[in-house]
Image (cartoon, helix red, strand yellow):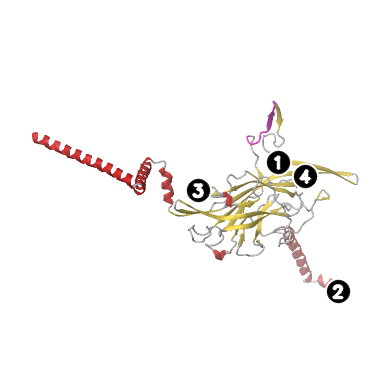
């Protein structure tokens, strides 16, 4: 052992030893923090709080997600594209389903005109408990406190309730143009999906920026539907209402409805394992892992969704369905929520509606103008008179003869009158 130590520290060997020590220190300083950070491939938001993404599609007993390549499904994290009969069935069968979403954000304060800061009740001024002194909606919406005693030591725990928003918009985008009788993606019923589910992931893992900083912890209390709209924008930005809204069936669809939350993708019987749970603690006590975990999932179900087609005055029209969901995501927060994503609710948020027409579109414009143009009104009157005369001639031949004799007599009278006028003119010329 002595000889080994002597050989290592003697001559050139001591420089090798120093070099190894320096290399080890540098490797620790570089690799250690990188391993600690566990850098992932991508992320949608660096704000604290819930982060939304598309986690997959469930259709016809199969699930599709970004965990493995599938030609039917393409996801960018916060957007997706899915074609139920595969990319080879282009221009026929089912249309593509395309979707996107906003981040989960704290809605920018609403002004007092929408929610007054003070109510006048019988001449008594009562402050609105849901607004602050500036007349704006208050967030956090509520605050809860508990005092826990352990070994004669009392600790105060506080949890806040925040109302945040999430918008998800989904459209059906048929390929090609609408052509009648072509059995294309615009035709019904081939161009409609039944019971397809779009799964949303809400990542609630705590976010940190500096090693050792105090973190805030988040739980999804509930996801409630605030509203749903049918129809999307055209290329000019004008909202195109769905031709037949009754054909679109989605779930949830009633405002105030809530969705069920799951701890694993595609639900309880999902094909994918749940995210690894971490037991989080705050001020020396454990947070309930059922709620304060890493992620929850919920589905949006499209019971009847796809393309619609119809005839109108010789023109065949096709339109892809569009539906936009407005969700209120209630979050429970333990700790100081410092880095927040606050923005105004987007006006008219939603995808563009696919729209196509085939045929004589000018015929529709012509008939629309008939009732407002005097010239067209005279044309209509003439057509009506001719039609009535034709009906009279066909069904009442005797009456037609009477009309003919009347017109004939009038014609003869006009002819004799014309001859008399001509004769009178000739006589007057001879006298001159």
Does dot 4 land on a helix, a strand or a loop? strand
In the picture, the quarter occupied by the C terminus is: top left
Does dot 1 land on a helix, a strand or a loop? loop
Q: Position of residue 6 (x, y in %)?
A: 84, 72
The residue to which callout 3 is attached is 236
Q: CA distance from mark 2 to mark 3?
A: 87 Å
Q: CA distance from mark 2 to mark 4?
A: 65 Å
Q: Is residue 79 magenta?
A: no
**Label for residue 3?**
2
Does dot 2 land on a helix, a strand or a loop? helix
Compared with 324, 134 (above or below) is above
Q: How many marks?
A: 4
Q: Position of residue 427 (x, y in %)?
A: 11, 36
Mark 4 residue crowding within 10 angstroms, few (<14) / some (14–19) / many (20+): some
Q: CA distance from mark 1 to mark 3?
A: 36 Å
Does dot 3 land on a helix, a strand or a loop? loop
Inspect this view and state whether residue 432 appears: no
Mark 1 residue crowding within 10 angstroms, few (<14) / some (14–19) / many (20+): some
Of the numbered discs 2 and 1, the one sitting upstream in the chain is 2
Q: Position of residue 66 (x, y in %)?
A: 65, 61
The residue to which callout 4 is attached is 159
The stretch of residues the image draws in magenta is: 113-122
Q: Position of residue 33 (x, y in %)?
A: 74, 58
Left or right of 40, for residue 280: right
Image quadrant assignment for residue 342: top right
**Do labels 2 and 1 touch, CB within 8 Å?**
no
Compared with 82, 426 (above or below) is above
In the picture, the quarter occupied by the N terminus is: bottom right
Task: Select label 2 or label 1 by which is in front.
Answer: 1
């Amino acid at each position: 052992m002595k000889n080994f130590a002597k050989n290592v520290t003697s001559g050139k060997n001591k420089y090798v030893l120093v070099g190894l020590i320096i290399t080890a220190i540098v490797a620790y300083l570089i690799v250690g923090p990188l391993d600690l950070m566990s850098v992932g491939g991508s992320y949608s938001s660096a704000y604290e709080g819930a982060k939304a993404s598309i986690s997959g599609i469930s259709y016809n007993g199969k699930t599709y997600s970004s965990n493995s390549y599938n030609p039917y499904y393409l996801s960018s994290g916060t957007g997706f594209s899915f074609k139920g009969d595969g990319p080879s069935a282009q221009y026929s069968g089912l249309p593509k389903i395309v979707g996107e979403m906003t981040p989960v954000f704290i809605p920018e304060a609403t002004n007092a005109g929408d929610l007054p800061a003070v109510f006048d009740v019988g001449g008594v001024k009562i402050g609105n408990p849901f607004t602050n002194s500036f007349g704006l909606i208050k967030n956090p919406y509520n605050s809860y406190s508990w005092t826990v005693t352990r070994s004669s030591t009392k600790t105060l725990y506080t949890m806040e309730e925040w109302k945040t928003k999430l918008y998800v918009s989904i459209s059906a985008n048929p390929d090609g143009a609408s052509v009648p009788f072509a059995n294309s993606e615009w035709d019904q019923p081939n161009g409609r999906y039944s019971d397809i589910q779009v799964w949303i992931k809400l990542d609630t893992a705590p976010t940190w920026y500096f090693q050792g900083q105090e973190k805030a912890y988040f739980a999804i209390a509930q996801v409630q539907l605030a509203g749903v709209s049918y129809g999307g924008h055209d290329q000019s930005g004008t909202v195109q209402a769905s031709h037949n809204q009754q054909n679109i069936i989605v779930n949830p669809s009633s405002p105030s409805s809530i969705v069920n939350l799951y701890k694993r993708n595609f639900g309880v019987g999902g094909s994918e394992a749940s995210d690894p749970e971490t037991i989080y603690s705050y001020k020396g006590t454990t947070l309930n892992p059922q709620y304060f975990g890493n992620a929850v999932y919920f589905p949006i179900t499209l019971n009847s969704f796809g393309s619609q087609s119809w005839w109108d005055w010789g023109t065949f029209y096709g339109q892809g369905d569009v539906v936009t969901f407005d969700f209120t995501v209630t979050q429970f927060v333990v700790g100081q929520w410092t880095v927040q994503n606050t923005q105004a609710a987007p006006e008219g948020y939603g995808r563009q509606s696919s729209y196509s027409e085939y045929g004589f579109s000018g015929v529709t414009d012509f008939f629309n103008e008939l009732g407002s143009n005097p010239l067209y009104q005279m044309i209509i009157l003439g057509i009506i008179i001719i039609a009535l005369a034709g009906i009279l001639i066909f069904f009442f031949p005797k009456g037609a003869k009477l009309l003919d004799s009347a017109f004939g007599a009038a014609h003869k009278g006009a002819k004799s009158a014309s001859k008399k006028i001509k004769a009178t003119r000739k006589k007057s010329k001879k006298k001159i």
